[in-house]
Amino acid sequence: MGNVLISKHYFTSTGFYPQCLSQLIRLHHAGVTASPIIKCVLFKADKNPKMTMNTKLNILLTSTLLAGLSFNLYAADSSPKEMLEDALSAAPPTLKDKVTVLDWEKNVLQKGDSRYTCFPTPPQLEGKAPMCMDEAWMEWADAWMNKKPFQAKTIGISYMLAGDQGASNIDPYAEGETEENQWVREGPHLMIITPDQSLLDSLPVDPNNGGPYVMWKDTPYVHIMIPVGERD
């Protein structure tokens, strides 16, 4: 069967789970058909209490249709050079040649000697959202992605100098903009975590105040956002 070009937005808008998309990309690189992802999708859909039966059936149909296809995904089509350039766009100029760069399969795209690790835009996202993190932020990211408790042991600094495609300022797991969730599309910025969260009480939580602000306050993943460039 012919190749099919499918946007990453299609997967997220139809409820296709990012974890399953990552598995699909691995299978694509290995030349394996997509059928093994059906179990992944169905298991995760069945465990989601908010998902209606119609949505589950929609996901089942989508997964079944994908099973016999060979895919050209946007993320899969990204070359190592393109992923490297994307990841390095998050870093300040003084760090670009010193950071380690990994793709989302943990393949090394650049070996560095600094304490920073940079990643390209996650494959399940549209637009740009590369990120460079120190050790403290790597621990933070692991806790956030796996919904685990987190307490920073040291001050941590992360760079997103290419900006991002948007996030809720109050809900760490919001998947899209609503009238209530303070969605903000930030331009180039730094992010800081600190062991003493009481230090953040002196900062505003309004992302439109024109300076640094606190994101995800009253959650384990609270951090300071420091805009350093214009928003799109």
Image: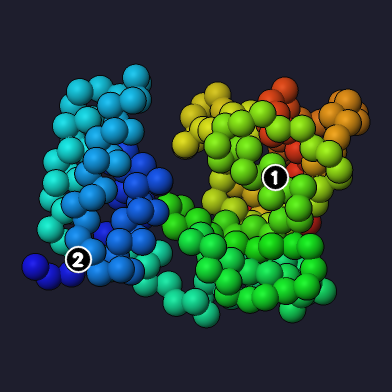
Residue at 48% in and 61% down? 105
Q: Which residue is mark 2?
A: 70
Above or below, 158 relative to 112:
above
* Quarter placement of the N terminus: bottom left
Which of labels 2 and 1 is toward the front?
A: 1
Q: Quadrant of residue 131?
A: bottom right
Q: Which residue is mark 1?
A: 139
**How far is disc 2 from disc 1 in space, using C-alphas?**
36 Å
The reply, left or right, for residue 232 in relation to residue 132 is: left
User: Label 2 crowding class (10 Å Cα cut-off): few <14, some 14-19, many 20+?
Assistant: some
- Residue 137 in sight from this viewpoint: yes
- Residue 7 in sight from this viewpoint: no
Give how far across and how far down residue 58 sits, in percent. Answer: 18, 36
Residue at 31% in and 56% down? 24
Residue at 76% in and 53% down? 135
Which element type, helix, strand or loop, lies under badge 1? helix
Viewer-side residue, 49 vs 58: 49
* Quarter placement of the C terminus: bottom right
Viewer-side residue, 209 vs 120: 120
Which element type, helix, strand or loop, lies under badge 2? strand
User: Label 1 crowding class (10 Å Cα cut-off): few <14, some 14-19, many 20+?
Assistant: some
Along the polypeptide, which appears first: circle 2 or circle 1? 2
Viewer-side residue, 7 vs 81: 81
Residue at 82% in and 74% down? 94
Q: Which amino acid, by three-letter code, is at mark 2?
A: Ser
Give how far across and how far down residue 15 sits, in percent. Answer: 31, 38
The reply, left or right, for residue 186 in relation to residue 202 is: left
Give how far across and how far down residue 8 sits, in percent. Answer: 36, 55
Q: Which amino acid, by three-letter code, is at mark 1?
A: Glu
